[in-house]
């Protein structure tokens, strides 16, 4: 997730200070990726260092406002125009966990898969309920009500639902792979046992 570009997108609509940016970012994403104010100001400092934002004065309460620069707008437009690359996919903790589990003796990989499936199904049910509430016009606590924010939240929810559905299908596939592997190992073990028994039988016949 690019917090950097998310903040630029908000500043492109006018100067804001840190807490405003945090609140609006979470409103538009349904707090799916919560930010803390320290994270926001750290990102703003880097953006200012890179010439993408600049200080825009303070209000009567001492809030430091930031505004996007021309370079920042160009960076934002480039971000919108450039597809998210898949050449270097982000590390997925679940995929890494299962890859490690099948190589570590003593791990019940099927139990790991089943536990994750239960968790993912519950998450899918939660996302589906949230989508139903959003479609019914139920405003989330702390959100800034607007049609654009509601649409943004629905798009995020759709992505979470599709992603979780895909994860559940992948877990089903993993379980099938594990069952096939177990059957293959069982067949090889049985074949090895038969091959070992055959010479012994021949030896007994020769002695007879």
Image (tube, rainbow, N blue to C red):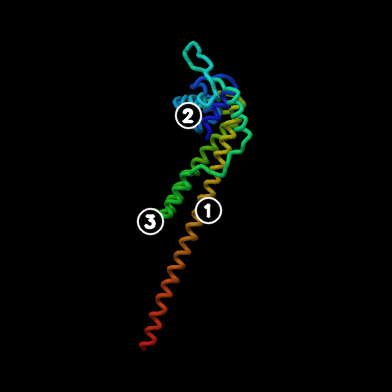
Res. 100 visible in picture: yes
Residue in the picture at 52% in, 52% down: 172
Q: Which of 83 and 115 is in front in this view?
A: 83
Q: Do the residues labelled 1 and 3 touch (CB within 8 Å)?
A: no
In the picture of the structure, the residue carrying the numbered disc 3 is: 105
Q: Which of 73 and 181 is in front in this view?
A: 73
Residue in the picture at 47% in, 63% down: 183
Q: Does residue 104 lie above or below 208 as drawn?
A: above
Left or right: where does residue 177 sit relative to residue 84? left
Q: Does residue 33 lie above or below 55 as drawn?
A: below
Q: Which residue lies furthest to the bottom in this view?
A: 208
Query: Circle 1: is it few (<14), some (14-19), or many (20+) Cα within 10 Å?
Result: few
Total numbered badges shown on the rendered structure:
3
Residue in the picture at 53% in, 37% down: 127
Res. 22 visible in picture: no
Mark 1 and mark 3: span between their CA atoms?
Answer: 22 Å
What is the secondary structure assignment of the residue under circle 3? loop
Q: Which of the two discs, 2 and 1, labels the residue nearer the N terminus?
A: 2
Residue 145, image x and y in percent? 57, 24
Residue 64, image x and y in percent? 49, 17
Mark 2 and mark 1: span between their CA atoms?
Answer: 34 Å
In the picture of the structure, the residue carrying the numbered disc 1 is: 173
Residue 38, image x and y in percent? 44, 25
Specify the quadrant that holds the C terminus.
bottom left
Q: Which residue lies furthest to the left in this view?
A: 207
What is the secondary structure assignment of the residue under circle 1? helix
Q: Which of 93 and 29 is in front in this view?
A: 93
Mark 2 and mark 3: span between their CA atoms?
Answer: 39 Å
Disc on res. 16:
none
In the picture of the structure, the residue carrying the numbered disc 2 is: 35
């Amino acid at each position: 997730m690019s917090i950097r570009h998310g903040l630029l997108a908000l500043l492109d609509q006018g100067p804001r200070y840190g807490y405003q940016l945090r609140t609006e970012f979470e409103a538009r994403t349904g707090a799916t990726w919560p930010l803390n104010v320290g994270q926001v100001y750290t990102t703003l400092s880097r953006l200012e260092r890179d010439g993408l934002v600049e200080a825009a004065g303070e209000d009567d309460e001492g809030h430091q406002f930031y505004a996007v620069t021309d370079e920042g707008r160009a960076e934002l437009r480039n971000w919108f125009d450039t597809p998210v690359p898949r050449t270097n996919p982000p590390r997925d903790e679940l995929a890494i966990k299962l890859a490690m589990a099948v190589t570590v003796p003593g791990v019940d990989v099927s139990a790991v898969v089943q536990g994750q499936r239960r968790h993912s199904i519950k998450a899918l049910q939660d996302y589906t309920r949230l989508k139903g509430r959003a479609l019914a016009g139920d405003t989330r606590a702390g959100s800034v009500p607007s049609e654009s924010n509601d649409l943004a939240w629905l798009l995020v929810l759709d992505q979470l639902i599709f992603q979780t559905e895909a994860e559940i299908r992948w877990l089903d596939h993993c379980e099938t792979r594990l069952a096939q592997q177990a059957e293959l190992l069982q067949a090889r073990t049985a074949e090895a046992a038969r091959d070992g028994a055959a010479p012994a039988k021949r030896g007994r016949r020769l002695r007879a």
